[in-house]
Image (cartoon, rainbow, N blue to C red):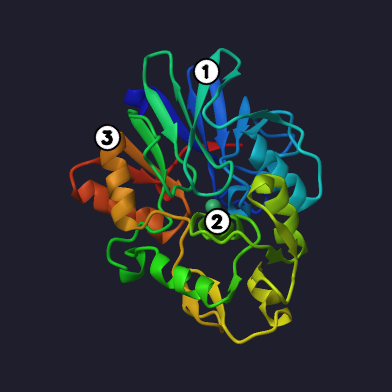
């Protein structure tokens, strides 16, 4: 990867273990990617790029740095979710933002409201792209070094191959069912789908889902609190508060205690492979989530003849 003029590095955490995320060194810069804040004694990055507001992307910590960079919607979602003030800079997805002398471009990924991929070019002309989590790769540009997610990146696991079950969702909507969905991400996807399918009435929601949805997609109303007389979208643990028998959790999992409808915020394995073909990089670094799926996708890409590695193979450390 040094041929490309970029070096991935990890921090060692207070327990002496590699932190579960990475930073990229290039030219005279250091960009931290979906990482927690560096301890004061540690090398400080030029920027904390936060792709979206899910907790496994560490915005809860990075949002407190003036070096944080996140979309307007991601910054607002972090504030509502964590009840603290976002201290960094913001952009509208699709705009570029300067970090020192580096122009960082931003691209929509369709994973959550405000989710963004980041790309920039180094002094030697290497184009680097960081995906964050992706549902729709169509707006992502070509690059040389792709730093990719692999949430459903295990080619040998049949649960990594799926299609969204929109027919069942539409049928359940017509039956007046209640939907269980996580407050940030899935709840807004459900609302967007309900409106696209022609449902114009009130949507009832529990407190946090309502706050996030009103803030992030207020024009998709009308919304109300949990309400017996309309269709409700509530977090899975609030499903028992809603009367009626027809209840479905919107997820790919099957161990939820209620019937489920497959509706994912992610690309499946086939989608990830199509995304990589679309971006056509020289080299791929699989950075998220850590662990087996990243290793397996990197291994699979190597077998396909690509230069690929995973977070776990990074052997440069910042102290
Ligand atoms: Zn996510």
Circle 3 SS class: loop
Mark 1 or 2, nearer chain start = 1
Work out whether 290 lies above or below 5.
Answer: below
For the question of whether residue 291 can be seen, the reply is yes
**Residue 230 to residue 71: above or below:** below
At label 3, counting other C-alpha atoms closer than 10 Å, the crowd grade (few under 14, some 14-19, many 20 or more) is some
- Mark identifier at residue 195: 2
Q: Position of residue 245 (x, y in %)?
A: 60, 87
Task: Write down the residue under mark 1.
Answer: 103
Q: Return the x and y of residue 290 as percentages of the image width and height.
A: 47, 54
Task: Check disc 3 and report the residue beneath it.
Answer: 280
Q: Residue at x 69, y 39 (%)?
A: 75
Task: Report how far apart the C-alphas of labels 3 and 1 lie in the structure.
Answer: 22 Å
Mark 3 vs 2, N-terminal side: 2
The residue positioned 70% from the left and 56% from the top of the image is 222
> Residues under labels 1 and 2: Cα distance?
37 Å
In the image, what residue occupies the spot 37% across and 21% down? 126
- For ligand 1, tell me if the residue under mark 3 lies within 8 Å: no
| Quarter in which the N terminus is drawn | top left
């Amino acid at each position: 990867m040094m041929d490309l003029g970029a070096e991935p590095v990890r921090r060692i955490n207070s327990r002496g273990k590699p932190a579960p995320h990475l930073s990229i060194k290039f030219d005279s810069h250091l960009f931290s990617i979906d990482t927690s804040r560096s301890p004061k004694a540690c090398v400080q990055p030029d920027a904390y790029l936060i792709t979206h507001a899910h907790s496994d992307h560490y915005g809860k910590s990075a949002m407190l740095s003036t070096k944080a960079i996140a979309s307007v919607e991601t910054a607002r979602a972090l504030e509502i979710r964590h009840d603290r003030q976002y201290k960094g800079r913001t952009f509208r997805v699709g705009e570029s933002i300067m970090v020192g002398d580096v122009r960082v471009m931003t691209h929509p990924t369709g994973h959550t409201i405000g989710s963004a991929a980041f790309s920039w070019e180094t002094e030697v002309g290497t184009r680097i792209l960081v995906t964050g989590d992706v549902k729709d790769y169509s707006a992502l540009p070509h690059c040389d070094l792709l730093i990719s997610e692999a949430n459903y990146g295990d080619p040998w696991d049949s649960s990594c191959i799926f299609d969204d079950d929109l027919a069942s969702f539409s049928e359940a909507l017509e039956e007046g069912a209640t939907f269980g969905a996580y407050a940030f991400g899935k709840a807004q996807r459900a609302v967007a789908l309900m409106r696209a399918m022609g449902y114009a009435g009130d949507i009832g929601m529990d407190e946090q889902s309502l706050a996030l949805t009103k803030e992030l997609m207020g024009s998709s109303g009308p919304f109300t609190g949990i309400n017996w007389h309309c269709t409700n979208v509530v977090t899975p643990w609030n499903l028992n508060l809603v009367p009626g028998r027809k209840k479905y959790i919107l997820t790919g999992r099957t161990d939820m205690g209620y019937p489920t409808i497959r509706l994912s915020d992610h690309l499946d394995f086939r989608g990830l492979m199509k995304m990589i073909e679309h971006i056509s990089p020289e080299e791929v670094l699989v950075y998220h989530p850590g662990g087996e799926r990243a290793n397996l996708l990197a291994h699979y890409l190597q077998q396909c003849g690509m230069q690929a590695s995973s977070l776990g193979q990074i052997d440069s450390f910042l102290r």
